[in-house]
Image: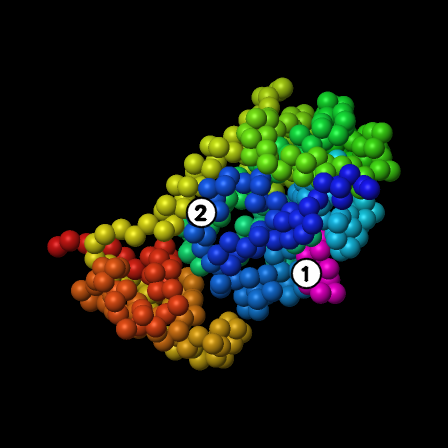
């Protein structure tokens, strides 16, 4: 029996999503993330989901790819677990065929990175014609590795229910997951006998010819041979071996993630900066690394930041709150694409920073929700007092709605006279 199949349990949780407050995450999160994370209340993102995308209905995103106009970095062990499904297995074959699979996992090329920067400058995310995720099944619109996707894809919402406060929380969870994925990808390679030192020396060498390592689809044959070494031709076998060793150590993953350094090729990273066209330089973020430096990432530190962001997300300050003067409540005319998308909402919150300014954002709400926020006009009231209103009692989760209104700056603290 293959090693991976032998270590997977019957109906293994690693092979199916885990759902937290309506949000779906890879099953491996149950072991690689801190146990305390599963005691938190996550924001239920109801207003923007993959298969009910507001951006593709009324904001210019492609209806077929939506936010999948992106090349995610998916770790080897996630791909190995995905190979246990028919769709995931075929997805790996596509990566191999395109030249986008490296020992660490799915890895975009320098040329593809430039394409992404160009899309960013052109504000073409969601509408790109050149940066398209190969994991998306165009026939169904579904991700072929949805239960094994990376932390970026798992935590990205084009429109967060809780505004910037919600986005800040998801960024911290995303950073935590990404750190752990990178650590486990490199750790698992060493555990299965892959020469990680040779691998990064190969990256260092490729930096000397950075302009010639990419094809239109992926990495060149020369680059792939240099990076894969003796494992060339056995790519899927390596993905599955990494998945097996991670699965065998499922109860140690958090400890492993906090005991390893993430390695990078500094010469290659520096060479990447040299190929960025002048007109795209402002799109590049990050700081230069000193020669020979290693990136030290401590998930325990990031977890503390996650907890701080979570506290800010659900914090209910005391005092009196009023409806923001920037807010107007208007009927849903059900004429525009956006209004038709929100056909089940009778009212829109419209937010303007000044009366003469264009609308910054709109949010469809129900009459009961509108009645609840309207109660904060004039003299205002406390958040706890509002929970006793008839409108609040008719809502499924009035506390969550009021928290959303607070985080989206619809409700403001009333200043003392």
| Residue at position x 22%, y 59% in the image | 382
Image quadrant in which you'd find residue 107: top right
Name the image quarter holding the N terminus. top right
* Residue, far right: 233
Residue range (magenta): 130-144
Q: Nearer the viewer, residue 407 or 42?
A: 42
In the image, residue 131 lies in the stretch drawn in magenta = yes
Left or right for 271, reference 328? right
**Residue assigned mark 1:** 142
Overall secondary structure of the magenta section: loop
Q: Nearer the viewer, residue 62 or 357?
A: 62
Estimate the x, y position of residue 154 in percent, counting from the top left. Answer: 58, 50
Total numbered labels placed on residues in the image: 2
Image quadrant in which you'd find residue 233: top right
Name the element at disc 2: helix
Q: What crowding class fits label 1: few (fewer than 14 Cα within 10 Å), some (14-19), or many (20 or more)?
A: some
**Residue assigned mark 2:** 39
Left or right for 260, reference 390? right
Estimate the x, y position of residue 200 in percent, counting from the top left. Answer: 72, 26
């Amino acid at each position: 029996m293959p090693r991976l199949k032998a270590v997977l349990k019957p109906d293994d949780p690693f092979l199916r999503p885990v759902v937290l407050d309506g949000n779906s995450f890879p099953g491996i999160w149950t072991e690689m993330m801190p146990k305390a994370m599963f005691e938190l209340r996550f924001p239920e993102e109801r207003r923007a989901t993959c298969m009910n995308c507001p951006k593709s209905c009324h904001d210019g995103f492609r209806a077929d790819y939506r936010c999948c106009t992106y090349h995610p970095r998916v770790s080897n062990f996630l791909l190995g677990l995905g190979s246990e499904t028919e769709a995931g297995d075929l997805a790996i074959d596509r990566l191999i065929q395109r030249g986008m699979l490296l020992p660490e996992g799915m890895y975009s090329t320098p040329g593809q990175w430039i394409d992404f920067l160009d899309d960013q400058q052109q504000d073409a995310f969601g509408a790109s014609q050149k940066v398209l995720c190969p994991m998306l099944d165009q026939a169904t619109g579904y991700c072929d590795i949805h239960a094994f996707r990376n932390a970026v894809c798992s935590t990205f919402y084009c429109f967060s229910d809780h505004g910037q406060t919600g986005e800040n929380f998801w960024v911290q969870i995303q950073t935590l997951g990404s750190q752990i994925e990178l650590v486990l990808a490199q750790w698992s390679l060493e555990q299965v006998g892959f020469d990680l030192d040779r691998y990064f020396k190969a990256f260092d060498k490729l930096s000397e010819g950075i302009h010639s390592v990419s094809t239109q689809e992926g990495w060149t044959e020369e680059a792939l041979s240099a990076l894969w070494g003796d494992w060339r031709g056995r790519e899927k076998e390596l993905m599955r071996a990494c998945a097996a060793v991670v699965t065998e150590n499922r109860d140690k993953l958090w400890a492993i993630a906090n005991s390893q350094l993430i390695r990078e090729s500094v010469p290659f990273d520096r060479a990447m900066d040299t190929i960025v066209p002048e007109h795209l330089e402002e799109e590049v973020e990050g700081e230069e690394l000193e020669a020979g430096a290693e990136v030290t990432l401590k998930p325990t530190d990031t977890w503390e930041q996650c907890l701080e962001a979570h506290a800010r997300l659900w914090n209910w300050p005391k005092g009196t709150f009023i409806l923001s003067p920037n807010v107007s409540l208007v009927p849903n005319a059900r004429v525009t694409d956006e209004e038709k998308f929100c056909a089940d909402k009778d009212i829109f919150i419209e937010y303007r920073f000044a009366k003469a300014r264009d609308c910054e954002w709109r949010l469809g709400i129900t009459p009961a929700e509108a009645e609840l926020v309207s109660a904060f006009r004039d003299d205002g009231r406390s958040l706890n007092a509002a929970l006793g209103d008839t409108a609040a009692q008719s809502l499924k989760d009035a506390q969550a709605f009021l928290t959303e209104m607070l985080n989206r700056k619809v409700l403001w603290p009333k200043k003392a006279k």
